[in-house]
Amino acid sequence: MKAIRTFTVRPVLAESLAPLDRLASNWRWSWSRATHALFASMDPALWDEIGANPARMLGALGQDRLDELALDEEFVARVREEDERLTAYLEGDRWFQQLEGGKPVHIAYFSPEFGVDGSLPQYSGGLGILAGDHLKSASDLGVPLTGVGLFYRAGYFRQSIGDDGWQRESYPLLDPYGLGLALLRDREGAPVEIALDLPGDRCLHARVWVADIGRIPLLLLDSETPSNTDEMRRVTDRLYGGGGEHRLLQELLLGVGGVRAVRAWSELTGRPTPDVYHTNEGHAGFQGLERMSELITSDGLSFDEALAQVRAGTVFTTHTPVPAGIDRFPRDLIADFLSSGLFQGLDAGRAISLGLETWDGGDQGVFNMAVLGLHLGQHANGVSVLHGEVSRGMFGMLWPGVDSDEVPITSITNGVHAPTWVHPALKAVSERAWGDAHTDTHDWTDRSVVSDAELWGVRQQMKGELVAEARRRVAASVSNGHTPSWVEDLLDPEVLTIGFARRVPTYKRLTLMLRDPERLTRLLTDPERPVQIVIGGKSHPADDSGKILIQQLVRFSRDPKVRGRIVFLPDYDITLAKDLYPGCDVWLNNPLRPLEACGTSGMKAALNGALNLSILDGWWDEWYDGENGWAIPTADTASNDEERDDAEAAALYDLIEHQLVPRFYDREGGIPLRWLAMVRHTMTELGKKATSDRMVRDYVERLYVPAAAHDVALQANEFLEAREVAAFVGRVREAWNRVSIASVDSSGIPQQAQAGDTLEVRADVRLDGLSPDDVAVELLYGTTNEDDALSRDHSVYRLSPGASAADGATVFSGKLPLSVTGTFGYTVRVRPAHAQLVSPVELGLVTYAS
């Protein structure tokens, strides 16, 4: 008999245990080893059974056990100590508070998913995990940030694998109270509700759940409220659970509702309104239109002035390297919503133009959320150096006439939250050796601090825990309830273990390892030096091609010849990942290059002492150094996908057989010393840069601080600068097709130039009504290739304006001492110039000398 409703009944805590409520409701417990251990000690078996969540623990433990613990002086003292630690963590100054100079007062960080902990399944993969790590590091660093997302009542989905190897999905409903979330209430105690007016006289309401992620509030909007119709209640039913209007409603609620939720939160808490808005991928792009609507209706700005103001304080991060990964909606559908009164005062036609694919080859019948994000965000970035390069090429059409290397999209490489992802046993070694568990300053190469025996011992302990968890999961997944005897021998802690786990779109190539099944079988079953592979991953419920890949892998793993040496573990999530990353010796990643934007799973493995075996894509392309793992050669010259897969699979097998296996099994005193030397190097070098602390510091210094400065500058004096910027942009756009370089003359260089000579350049520029202050005329110079193209690292020298020429052109000139040797070239260009432009080519208006 199934209940029609479930909820959590909380016990009454004695005064001595009252701090447990606060400790349970702040998700810092998910990365605090001491707080985690405190709750686990209350009943270790129950802790594992309920999914290691403190709020659930308090509901499941029972009043009698809690009353018993209230009389345990040692336990009460631990509770008091943890409460004091939490207070110090929340109230003390941290890195951001000591940062000198101007800085943001409040950053609103929007994301469609957040991966904070396995017991809060509001994520599907890397995007959400990255967002969760971003919040945690922002908390650890003291950054004044607020997360904004949606609360999905069924989360993503739970995965099981049928006897036929096919993925099956289930959607257990979540109780937000039982998870430790709190409903945002007004001063009278009533739930705060956000409302969005929709076409057809419909209205979408949402309540706001608050999760405290250390110092960071995470606001999650939930459409499950009595104010909604049944249709509207289903808007936040599942993460990525629908398409068309359902997905659009989710993104409108995230963007528009998210801004309104932040406004309500700021008013109730006294926190200043955000001066920086960060959209993590394009799903939250409508937040910019909502803010424009506010500026137009409340502050009297025009469309262009509001656009300038919104752009100044917006950071847009793109995560996708392929157009197919971008959300796109029919133009007519967007038009219906923009004309419904949802965005007061906003010109619907001009607003739609911000997301249309107006370039040659684009589809003007669709509204592109990444295009919207880039038009509304003056500060934009990709998530690795290579991904930034790919993004500049992918979106370069938005800046016509601009070379791809100058497209204003920078890169900040992702990182991972070390306190969350480093295994407790390794944290304990770190704390013994250096006094804390952070990884960015520790020299693991010093054998006098951590011996080979100690390091190898903890690595083997972590692998043993993975083997035990794999056996438990496989036994639990058997449909008839009878555990086969072979499960008891599944995997071996002494065997070289390769891990592979991620979402399963086709470009990640889950089954590349199966390309030559006979060769793989020989590697897995070698009697002297075998290999074993542990795999996890979910395919989107609507992606049958991904499900087919999982089925192929599962069927291969069930072949009696290899069973026990290769295993697919169902329901890959944060909880499984915390066993999987530390328990593997090698982390495998073999996407189609360059389709992996970053790929942070390998970072998590590396911080736990695993070596990477990967295609040179994402973060591995910039941080592979020959000593932290192995690079799988990319078959870029292959004539088709089949040939490419064959070549890269063969290279993968060769690396495993001829490099990984010999080095792992080469032992002295039972310890693989050369292998451990690579482990030590990996943990030391990647520990310095593969963390989300480094990532968040980069965001603060390179994007948040400039965005806040621009936002403040444009707002000053009743938006005087915003009005001026808008007028400037309008003026130069109107005149630009008439701006030209009439002539370029040079002198001062003898027939045989040499370093130290001075190049004198004069350019006559027709400005057609623009003033010399409106433009920059630049000499671009450097070495050239055989096609006379300037190198990417060319230099820029700004020419100075002078008197008008006889034909009305303005003369710009300059003298450049030559310091570049070899084949030298130069050109001259003119572009708009304004102090509030963050990139020289931000407006996409550039005229070169012909």
Image (spheres, rainbow, N blue to C red):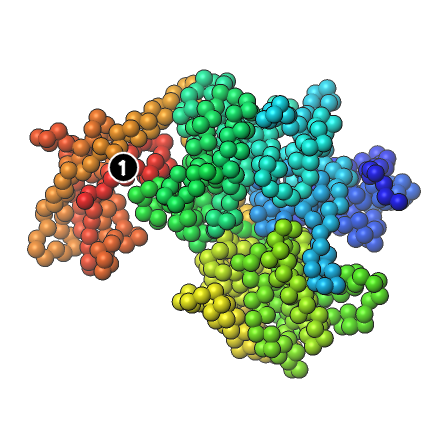
Residue at image position (54%, 55%) is 599
Task: Find residue 564 and report its horizontal and vertical position in percent.
Answer: 71, 72
Depth check, front residue: 635 or 672: 635
Q: Quadrant of the C terminus?
A: top left
In the image: residue 356, left or right of residue 90: left
Where disc 1 sits, the SS reads strand
Residue at image position (61%, 62%) is 549
Task: Find residue 558 and report its horizontal and vertical position in percent.
Answer: 71, 70
Can residue 836 be seen at all in this image of the molecule?
Answer: yes
Depth check, front residue: 154 or 653: 154
Q: Is residue 326 above or below residue 203?
A: below
In the image: residue 147, left or right of residue 315: right
Q: Quadrant of the N terminus?
A: top right
Q: Is residue 809 above or below residue 113?
A: above
Looking at the image, the residue that sits furthest to the right is 64
Can residue 660 be seen at all in this image of the molecule?
Answer: no
Looking at the image, the residue that sits furthest to the bottom is 527
Amino acid at the residue labelled 1: Arg
Residue at image position (35%, 49%) is 405
Task: Find residue 692 and report its horizontal and vertical position in percent.
Answer: 55, 48
Residue at image position (48%, 23%) is 346
Residue 259, quarter of the rendered image: top right
Residue on which the image places disc 1: 831
Task: Find residue 475 and report its horizontal and vertical position in percent.
Answer: 79, 64
Task: Please rate how many residues cluster around mark 1, counting C-alpha atoms within 10 Å: few if below 14, some from 14 to 19, many from 20.
Answer: many
Q: Is residue 283 above or below residue 510?
A: above
Instruction: Count numbered badges in the picture.
Output: 1
In the image: residue 158, left or right of residue 362: right
